[in-house]
Image: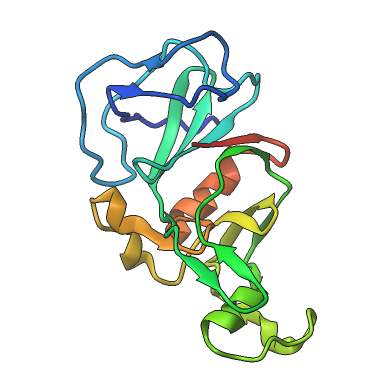
């Protein structure tokens, strides 16, 4: 059964010049500007063209609004507020990490229920701890990624969270809370898993 909801977007979304979309120029959306309040979408919305050249459903992560959308062609079917990277830079004597959410086109590599987070080296550096072997048991943290994860590769995922309160602020800037991943509430992360398939395109911009 198709999951049909009503969508709510800004009155205009301007894509970067390199964004792979059909046609040229800015994407013009009808209607007046709206303020996001929650993931329940208030009215049906249809863009004048698809943001991604795909015949399948695809995901759009809009960083300016810190919001995740599921599109089918020109129509937004679903949306939820998201948390994204802080943009903070962590430097040590041997490594440097940038905690921004990367922009670009991705493919969903795999999806997982009840994922276990494997802490990367930066987590130990950030907490002043010695970095263990890659497969050391101390690296594995059940529950840190919530109840669902959609993996995009290169250490980036759209996943749930054990701290949903961090995603409830209506100010998108206040939802820049991650180390690069895209966070959703557990409910929204599980819904996303049921709306798209492995191999679907994800546009982050």
**Residue nearest the observer in this picture, 73 or 107:** 107
Residue at the (49%, 36%) spot, across then down:
205
Could you tell whether 152 is left or right of 65 in the image? right
Residue at the (62%, 79%) spot, across then down:
93
Among the 4 quarters of the image, the one containing residue 83? bottom left
Q: Residue furthest front?
A: 93
**Residue nearest the observer in this picture, 89 or 200:** 89
Residue 72: horizontal and vertical position, in percent? 54, 23
Residue at the (39%, 32%) spot, across then down:
5
Up-down relation of residue 198 to residue 92 (above or below)? above
Q: Can residue 34 be seen in this view?
A: yes
Residue 2: horizontal and vertical position, in percent? 53, 30
Q: Is residue 44 visible?
A: no
**Residue nearest the observer in this picture, 196 or 49:** 49
**Residue nearest the observer in this picture, 52 or 149:** 52
Residue 28: horizontal and vertical position, in percent? 36, 14
Up-down relation of residue 104 to residue 57 (above or below)? below
Up-down relation of residue 2 to residue 106 (above or below)? above
Could you tell whether 130 is left or right of 28 in the image? right
Residue at the (45%, 11%) spot, across then down:
25
Among the 4 quarters of the image, the one containing residue 12? top left
Residue 66: horizontal and vertical position, in percent? 38, 46
């Amino acid at each position: 059964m198709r999951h049909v909801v009503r969508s709510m977007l800004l009155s205009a979304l301007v894509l970067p010049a390199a964004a792979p979309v059909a046609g040229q120029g800015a994407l013009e959306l009808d209607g007046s500007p709206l303020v996001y309040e929650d993931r329940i979408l208030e009215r049906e919305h249809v863009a004048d063209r698809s943001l991604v050249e795909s015949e399948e459903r695809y995901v759009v992560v809009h960083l300016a609004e810190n919001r995740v959308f599921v599109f089918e062609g020109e129509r937004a079917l679903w949306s939820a507020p998201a948390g994204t990277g802080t943009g903070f830079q962590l430097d040590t004597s041997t490594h440097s990490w940038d905690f921004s959410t990367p922009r670009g086109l991705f493919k969903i590599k795999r999806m997982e229920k009840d994922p276990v987070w494997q802490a990367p080296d930066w987590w130990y550096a950030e907490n002043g701890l010695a970095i263990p072997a890659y497969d050391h048991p101390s690296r594995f943290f059940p529950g840190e990624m919530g109840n669902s994860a959609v993996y995009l590769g290169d250490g980036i995922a759209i996943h749930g969270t054990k701290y949903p309160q961090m995603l409830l602020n209506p100010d998108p800037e206040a939802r820049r809370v991650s180390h690069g991943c895209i966070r959703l509430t557990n409910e929204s992360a599980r819904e996303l898993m049921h709306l798209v398939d492995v191999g679907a395109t994800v546009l982050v911009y």
